Structure formats: structure tokens, C-alpha cells
Amino acid sequence: MSLLQEERNIILNNEHVDNFDFAEVEDFVKNASKDLFISYNFKTKNKMLVQPRGGFPTYDKMFALYDFFDKADVDVLPCTIDSNTRLNDYATAKKMLRLSEENEVDMLNGYPLVTHGYRTSRKMMTHFNKPISLRHGTPDARLLIETAIASGIFEIEGGPITYLLPYSKNFPLDKAFLYWKYVERVCAEYSKLNEPINRESFGPLTATLVPPCITIVIQLLEMLLSLEEGVKSFSVSFSQTGSMNQDIVMGAVIRKLARHYSEEIGVTDADIHLVYHQWMGAFPMDQNYASQLINMSTVIASMVGANKIITKTKQEASGIPTKEANAETVANTQYLLRILNGLPKLKDEQEEEILTAEVMAIMEAVFNDPADTLWRKVFNSIKNGTIDVPFSPHIINNNEMITVRDRNKNIRIIKRGKVPIPHRCFEYEKNQCDLNKDTTSIVNDIIHDIGIMQ
Amino acid sequence: MKVVTGVVGNDIHVVANRLIELSLQARGFEVFNLGVNTYLEEFVDAVVETNADILLISSLNGEAEGWCREVKILKAKYGNLLDNVVFMIGGNLVVGTGDASDIIPRFKNYGFDLVFHQIDLNTGLDELEKFMKERN
């Protein structure tokens, strides 16, 4: 028995799991409809896939949500996990699910997949014959993704960095790397049975003035950590920055470098995709304005050439959206994608050159770390500030980098901390901004820049 | 002048926390930022440990009352170690639309010297500087 199988036995021998049948699950994955695999959909559907967000606690409400999405012609169904399950608190999730069912009032902010179990969930996840994407935010997703794949969920979002630095203050980063290594290997194993399980990195991070070079470096590193474990379908992603030009530049650079670095480690048989998140910052309260923002995101995603778009709703500013509002965005987005034709191909050579140089300089510093494995190199690079995510709550993040928007609303680095971008690139970034003002004014600018869509 | 700051309780609003840190530094304060998800005892321990002049607590998810009503108990427990420390709290202190004229006296009764509910960041810091100037 392999070490991985021993670990899997330990993980699945859990009081909250009702007898995990390895052979049956393997047989299920082997014979599952190809349409359930987003990796297959990426290859065969010649359009940008549309994926909303959403999760309700009870089976019935979740099913109703999926039914609404299906009628709105969704491409990818969402499965957002509740926050108790995110914290691996399955006992509380179970209690809250019972309360949600008994009182008809939602006591959870997502679907408690582990509590429902894979036998129940599979009936729903396979019913619509569409791919489902798991979104959860947990640094330790081992039990969750075992349940997800057994349920028929063949896309797993997240990673050791992207689901830790934006969400946690003190969950140990080294443990997160090891827990996600397990996830990668399980996904790789199941990928041998049918179409590949797709892994997707969460590019928005803190969604607060994160500079493109930091986003791309983290996407590339999570991709490499995934590919080195045998994953064959990976999606890199980023969210709307606030500048169409910057998004187009980011899309071009991340695609090019994803190909470059995957070939560097000798992986030529993996499919790499690009996912675009609609605006992840604060939304306008006015629902008409919110709808316009969403439509603008769709146009930009098309200009970027994204393979999948993850949508928002007009109710974003006021809380959890209804299934009606959610489905409305899906239908509107599908309509807009259908009528958006003859888009120009824009290219900004200078911006692409600067961004490429920044990313490659940081990647070189990561690879030059003396540690013996990639995950340890990445760990050290985060700890020593080579990688620094603005507004991360995590104590391991250096939090020395400061970013603002220039006159065209591009995100610019004005203090780089220990991030080793080349001096000429740093000078270029600073030269785009008006820095002849005191820090109090700059803080006011940052506050305005963060709330740019309100 | 030294300030201990952070976000109290199960609150992960990191943006405001970071901006407060930057603004305090810009105004010349020496800042010890405990970050998000910080508990009252941690704040007070840090104040004593750093010999800070000011404790500035943020709360942005409306749960401040549950986490901060024991300020007087801690002041009594720590005795003269906290005698000259200014206790300040600001942010979204209650869930929903609360009235500042109700909220401010309540939190002052819990033991805070300065209380701000839904106020602009720089306005709050201006008031803090004015308070410190008048006090010294």
C-alpha cells in the first residue's frame, strides 16, 4: 500500500464520513459522463464558460439553485462551501444544517458537503450533467475534496497560498503546502480514470490593489506545485483590476509565462486555462450601476480572451444574492457573450515587457532559494518578503508593499518592500504616479482607489 | 508616541487595519499592529509589553460589544500599568443602523476614552491627536 493510500485511509476514517467506498468511487469516476468534467468542456465547448457563485445549506435549496442556473443556460455550476466546513468544523456544520432544515432558515452561508455526504450529494451533482466547481477557502481541504470528487465535482478551486494568505491570520503555511500536496496527488490519481480533474488557483487573493506581478507569480507557483504532482488540467486566474488595459496585459503575460514555466519543468501534456473573476471589490449599492459593472467585466473578460468567467450579481453590495438575481446575471452574461463579436486584439508592448520582467525576476529569486523542494522555496520566499501580498491578514506576510492607482487606474507599486522587481521596472511604476504628496494624502488616495467602483 | 492597534474578535477586516497603521505612521506614531482576529487580553498584554501610550481597537463587523465590554475589568486587574493609557475604539460598532448618540456613551461606560462609530478614518485620527494634545 502506498503512503498516499495510507494517508487517504486515515483521512476518510472520520466520524463525519459514512464509510468511504474507494472501489465504488473509482468505478463512479471511471464511468462518469464526460460532460461533468470541466476539463472536457474546456476542450469541446468553443466559448467562454460562464460560472456563477452560490451555495445554500440544504439539499433542496441547492437543487433549486442549480435548476435556476440550468434554465439560465449556465456552463459551470458552483458549489460554495459553508464557513464552518471551511474551518474543518464539521460538527458545527452538521448542527447548523439540522437547524436550517428544521426551521427553514439558512444557518449556513454555503453547502456543507462533508455533512451531506457524497452519496446524497452525487444525486444532485450529476443530475444536470454539467461541470461543478468547488469553492471553499480552506487551507486543509483533504476530506472535502475526497467528498467532492466522490460526489461528482471534478473542478477543485484553491491552493496553499491563495486559500491561506487572504483568509487566515495564523494557519501554518507549511501545513497548508503539505495538505494541498495531498489534494494534488488525489486529483492526479483520479485523472487517470477519465478526463482530468481540473485544479484552479484563486487569483483575486485579497482583491485589494494586488499588483499584477504578485498575482501572476502566485498563480504560476501554484500551477507548478500542482503540475509536479501529476495534475493534467490547471486554470490560472485573476480578477478585474480596474483598468481594461492592465487586464489585457495581465492575460497576455500570464498565458505566455504559464506555458514557459510548465515547459521548464518538463510538463508538455497539461492543459492550462485562463479564468477571469468579475470585480471582486466593493460594489455600488445601486443595482443598476452594479449591473453595468458586471456587463463591463464581461466585455473585459472577452478582450482578455478568458476561458471561463466567474460572475457576480447586482445584489453584491447588500448580501447573499437570491437565486433569481444569480440566474439573471448568468442569462445576461450568456446573451452579452453571444452578441460580442469582432473584438479588436489590443496589445501594449511596453506594459507587457515591464510585467514580464517583474514576474521573471521574482520567479528567479524563488527558484534561487537554497531549499531543496519547490514548496519549501515558496514558503521561504513568502516568509522573507520576496512574495508580499498587499492587505493579507496572515502574520507570515511581510505587508511592506504599498500600491496605488495611476491616472489610468492601473495598479502601481510605490513601495516594493523586499519584492525583487528590477530597479528599472520599479522606477517605471513610480513614474506613472504623482508621489509629490505626503503619506496622509496617499492613504486617502488608497482609500479612494480601493472603492473605485462605488 | 506608541500605539497598539488591531481588529477585535472574529473580524478579518484587514484593509481598514492596514490603512490605520499607515496613517498612524504618517502622523509620526510608532505602531504595533496586532492585525485581525485579536482578543482584548492580547491587546492589553501588548500595551503593557510595549509600554504603549494608546490602544486603538477597530471593529468593523458590528460585534464590538461582545468582545469589548470587559475593558473595566481588565483595567482593574492590571492596575496602575494602564493608568496613563488612552483606550480608543472605532469602526462599525453595532450591527445595522445604530445611533452614535446611544453607542458612544455605552462604550465609554465600558471603559473607552474615545469612541467613534462610522466615522472617517482621518477624522478619527485628528480627534485622537487633539485629545492627546489637550491631555499632555
Image (tube, helix red, strand yellow):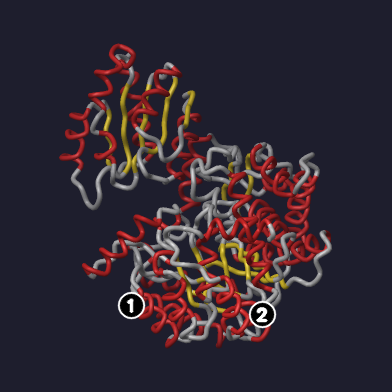
User: Tag 2's secondary structure?
Assistant: loop
Q: Position of residue A299 (x, y in %)?
A: 56, 75
Q: Is residue B90 above or below residue B25?
A: below
* Quarter location, residue B135: top left
Residue drawn at 71 percent across, 44 percent down: A376
Q: Quadrant of the N terminus of chain A?
A: bottom right
Chain letter for mark 2: A
User: Tag 1's secondary structure?
Assistant: helix
Q: Is residue A84 above or below residue A306?
A: above
Q: Are marks 2 and 1 in contact (CB under 8 Å)?
A: no
Residue tagged by mark 1?
A60
Q: Quadrant of the C terminus of chain A?
A: bottom left
| Of the pair A304 and A429, the residue shown nearer to us | A304
Residue drawn at 21 percent across, 30 percent down: B110
Which callout, 2 or 1, points at the residue further toward the start of the chain?
1
Q: Hey, what amino acid is under mark 1?
A: Asp
Residue farthest along the top direction in this orientation: B80
Q: Is residue A298 above or below residue B135?
A: below
Residue tagged by mark 2?
A194
Q: Hey, what amino acid is under mark 2?
A: Asn
Q: Is residue A290 in sight in this rendering? A: yes
Horizontal side of residue A337 vs B73, given as left or right: right
Residue drawn at 23 percent across, 70 percent down: A104
Q: Position of residue A37 (x, y in %)?
A: 60, 79
Q: Assess disc 2: are there few (<14), some (14-19) or many (≥20) residues with their C-alpha within 10 Å of its C-alpha.
A: some
